[in-house]
Image (tube, rainbow, N blue to C red):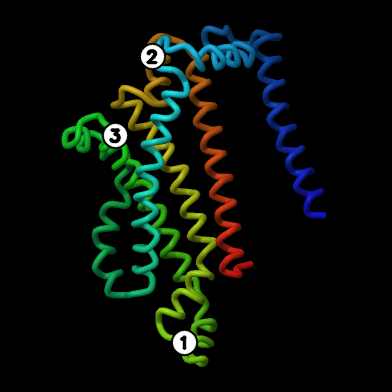
Amino acid sequence: MKDNKKIKYLCISILSVLAVIVIWYICIDVVHMKPETVFPGPVKVFRSFIDKLSSKAPDGATLQAHLWSSIKVALLGYALGAVIGVPLGIAMAWNKWVDRFVRPLFDLIRPIPGLAWIPMFILLFGIGITSKALVIFLGALIACIVNSYTGIRQTKETHLWVGDVFGATGSQKLFRIAIPTALPMIFTGLRVALGTSWTALVAAELLASTKGLGYMIQQARAISRPDIIIVGMLAIGAVGAVFDALLHLVEVKVAKGMNVK
């Protein structure tokens, strides 16, 4: 029964994508609502995608090279943000002294958008991988802290009281009650952080970079190549969707391992 629902959902998802492509094709290639020099149709975008797999024009690298450059930076900043953000959010929610110590600094940094950090990081570290990774790190860190903190705080007092009745220690209540309960929120934070990482990366590459999907889009904009711009946008969306699906699989595996329903 579940397999049938998954197949049905997959078919609906594929049909929705195909419907958008068909409407796009009709509007541009059949009705000609916009000239292809302004907004290209799916056929031209697909051809540009195939060409970009082997051609370095007009930005000096193939699509794969730009893609790998972006993924490498995004995963580095995201991994650092997750490794630090999740434990820190849990610690802030679980220990009031950690919360009092960290919260003032966190409340100061949280409202600052990632783009605001880019000029400072460029001055400090140049336009290399370090400055971009730090921008992504801050975005991922905030999302992970907020969701991990919220998840632990939502642990029901009744469950903790049951732990006290059975003589559970503080660490046992944390790892066997609070964290399993907060797991959905923690993974929500990881998924939000993943999206934030891609957004911050592309923004950083648009402003200061020599390679990457954001750089490719910026160069295409400068020479009026909307087909390459759309190729870059679709590549960002496709990679983000793949990473989100992989993270969902990890969430399912971890939840099963911790017996969380």
Residue at 26% from the left image edge and 35% from the top image edge: 118
Q: Position of residue 123 (x, y in %)?
A: 17, 33
Report helix, strand or loop for mark 3: helix
Precedes in sequence: disc 1 or disc 2: 2
Residue 100 position, x and y percent, is: 26, 70
- The residue tagged 3 is 129
Mark 2 highlights which residue? 59
The residue lying at 32 percent from left, 52 percent from top is: 110
Give the CA distance from mark 3 to mark 1.
46 Å
Inter-mark Cα distance, 3 to 2:
18 Å
Instruction: Tell me the quadrant of the picture where the C terminus can be found.
Output: bottom right
The secondary element bearing badge 2 is classed as loop
Q: Is residue 90 left or right of residue 116?
A: right
Describe residue 96's horizontal placement relative to residue 167 as left or right.
left
184 vs 74, nearest the viewer: 74
**Of the residues shown, which amino acid type is indicated by label 1?**
Ala
Picture quadrant where residue 41 is located: top right
Q: Going from the N terminus, do you reach mark 3 or mark 1 first?
A: 3
- Relative image position of residue 169 (x, y in whole percent): 42, 85
Vertical side of 261 occupied by 119: above or below: above
Residue 218 to residue 203: above or below: above
Task: Identify which amino acid the numbered label 3 is placed on.
Answer: Ile
Q: Which residue is mark 1?
A: 168
Left or right relative to 155: residue 69:
left
> Closer to the N terminus: mark 3 or mark 2?
2
Secondary element at tag 1: loop
Where residue 228 sits: x, y (%)?
Answer: 49, 16
- Asked whether disc 1 touches disc 2, contact meaning CB atoms under 8 Å apart, the reply is no
**Which residue is located at x 22 percent, y 37 percent?**
121
Q: Quadrant location of the N terminus?
A: bottom right
